[in-house]
Amino acid sequence: MKVAYIDQYKETFGVQPICDVLAETDAPIAPSTYYAAHTRPPSARSLRDGHLTEEIHRIHADNYGVYGARKIHAALVREGHQVARCTVERLMRQAGLRGVIRAKSPRTTRPAPETDRPADLVERQFTATAPNQLWVADITYIRTFSGWVYAAFVIDVFSRKVVGWQVATSLYTDLALDALEMAIWRRRHTGSDLTGLTHHSDRGVQYRAIRYTERLEQEAAVASVGSKGDSYDNALAEAFNSLFKAELIRNKGPWTGINGPCPRGVDTCSCRYAVSVR
């Protein structure tokens, strides 16, 4: 920082006078030290920091600018870089990069009547040892200029992959059922057997509908439902919804409706603050 300070003011005051003034402070520096800093080759650490910073910028840009230090560190490790997470945090701080911040959202579930409710077979243990052992499903609300849009997702717990999804402007059973049909088709298309699959959801009426439960029975899948008023019972799906809104909806909005974002863009739209997501 002292070298940068001298670089900034040396044309006005000269190197020696600045060093003379700094010698009377808690940050002294000799002129020889200043000139040596400009002539010696960069250290191995500074070279590595420069290379890692370029990689961090690339990963951050490739992922819509939403990745924080934890996810960027994981991406670097997957690519074969041996780097500590604290190093990633330091370089991101120096580069002025940060991840998107998630906002809290209210509950959106409309519970079905307490008639023949399936048991909670998951009990908050969102783990699987292979694909198609456990799927979780949920619906989230998105507010747009033209009204509410609803998105349904089906996620394979083993890979955390969205295997089925659908968006609609109404909250009918077909919304959740279409997402389920996509998930079933995609896995059947690759020759997967869904027998014994556990399908976990909240107590929403869409997942308790007869057509939905019958479709699960056709695939020999078992329905599992969390307890009343407890989002932790479907925590994996709730966490995905939070990421979906933070990384895509809020980050790429405002949204005109089900077809896409505002063509005027986030930075120019005068009504961007009228858009909220819950």
Image (cartoon, rainbow, N blue to C red):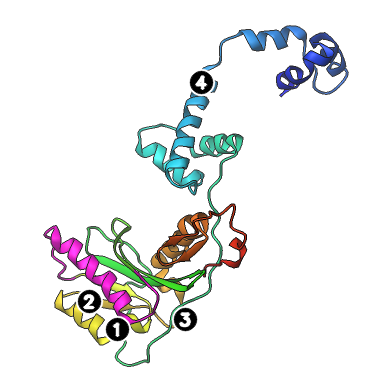
Q: Which residues are magenta?
A: 167-196
Question: Which is in the foreground here, disc 1 or disc 4?
Answer: 4
**Label 4: how many residues lie within 10 Å, few (<14), some (14-19) or many (20+)?**
few
Task: Tell me which residue sits at (29%, 83%) in the image.
Answer: 118
Disc 2: which residue = 222
Left or right side of 161 for 81:
right
Indicate the secondary structure of the residue bearing disc 3: loop
**Quadrant of image for the N terminus:** top right
Decide whether residue 180 is among the magenta residues. Answer: yes
**Residue kind at label 2, given as amino acid type:** Val
Front position in the image: 24 or 146 = 146
Decide whether residue 204 is among the magenta residues. Answer: no
**Residue kind at label 4, given as amino acid type:** Leu
Indicate the secondary structure of the residue bearing disc 2: strand
The image quarter in which residue 81 lies: top left
**Residue kind at label 3, given as amino acid type:** Gly
Q: Are marks 4 and 3 in contact (CB under 8 Å)?
A: no
Disc 1: which residue = 118
Disc 3: which residue = 229
Indicate the secondary structure of the residue bearing disc 4: helix
| Residue 202 appears in the rendering | yes
- Checking the image for residue 47, the label placed there is 4
